[in-house]
Image: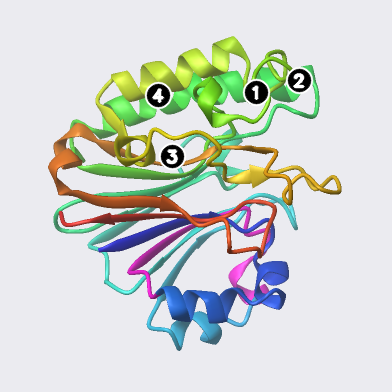
Amino acid sequence: MKILTYNVNGIRAAVRRGLVDWLTATDADLVALQEVKATLPQIDRAMFEDLGYRLYWFPAEKPGYSGVAILSKHPPRHVEYGCGVPVYDYEGRIIRADFDTFSLMSVYVPSGTMGDIRQAFKMEYLADFGDYVDSLRKTVPNLVISGDYNICHQAIDIHNPKGNANTSGFLPEERAWIGGFIENGFVDSFRYFNQEPHHYTWWSQRPGCRERNLGWRIDYHLVTESLKNCLQRAVILPEAKHSDHCPVLLELEP
């Protein structure tokens, strides 16, 4: 089974840049999207349905902001929209699709780059999200949590670790959170297969950053240990340029 995660930074803009043709060629079973920045009535859903996808959409209440979605070629048993916390669900941050052998969650962690208030909000979200997942795993033990975590875990995951040591997305407390989250029963699927540097999933839109590969690895497929033996492959796909992020592909046989 092929699973993509992709922060498209606006689904309508990504479509204009050729996303649908790229999805056709990639032929993923499941696609976790972040920052869709649109409601379903605002897009031509037939473009995706013609590829065999069912669309499950959880936009933010604020127009043109945030929002997550899952595209699936397999009918889920259940879809959970949000996490039940209004302040997070207002921003469209979590959607989950349950299948027979595992569940896929598309997650968009808040950014803290807009100042102290949003950084504090991000840290509160991370703490609450950790508790939410701990509770969820009691009834949904096989999880693939895919999305934009807005955190680089280790120095290998960022192009300038010393220069970014005090930057949101690479702060010690953020790195400690994601490290603890992984240690609590998850596998960073990309690092399971690849320990090499210079593999990133987001680049600043400042001129030359992507061309010079001055990036951050902030998009992950985190998989519960119970699915570790099902992992087949995990690769970053930087040639896809529909967004300031690029997609990450996970293959597993649950």
Count of residue discs = 4
> What amino acid type should be assigned to the residue bearing mark 2?
Ile
In the figure, is residue 123 to the left or right of 128? right
Q: Nearer the viewer, mark 4 or mark 3?
A: 4
Secondary structure state at the residue bearing disc 1? helix
Q: Which sits in the foreground, 18 or 67?
A: 18
Which residue extends farthest right?
Answer: 207
Chain-order first, disc 4 or disc 2? 2
Q: CA distance from mark 3 to mark 2?
A: 22 Å
Q: Earlier in the sequence, mark 3 or mark 1?
A: 3
Name the residue beneath numbered marker 1. Answer: 121
Q: Is residue 141 magenta?
A: no
Q: Which residue carries the number 3 mark?
A: 83
Residue nearest the observer in this picture, 216 or 103: 216
Compute the Cα span from label 3 to label 1.
Answer: 16 Å
- For disc 2, the marked residue is 117
Q: CA distance from mark 1 to mark 2?
A: 6 Å
> Is 29 part of what is drawn in magenta?
yes
Q: Which of pointers 4 and 1 lies earlier in the amino acid sequence?
A: 1
Q: Earlier in the sequence, mark 3 or mark 2?
A: 3
What x and y, as percent, mark residue 23?
49, 75
Q: Marks 4/3: CA distance? A: 12 Å
In the image, is 206 to the left or to the right of 53? right
Q: Which residue is mark 4?
A: 130
**Does the residue at mark 3 contact the one at mark 2 (Cβ under 8 Å)?**
no
Residues packed near mark 4 inside 10 Å, few (<14), some (14 to 19) or many (20 plus): some
User: Which corner quadrant holds the C terminus?
Assistant: bottom left
For residue 4, above or below residue 111? below
Residue 45 in sight in this render: no
**Residue contact between numbered discs 4 and 2, judged by CB atoms under 8 Å:** no
Magenta region? 27-42
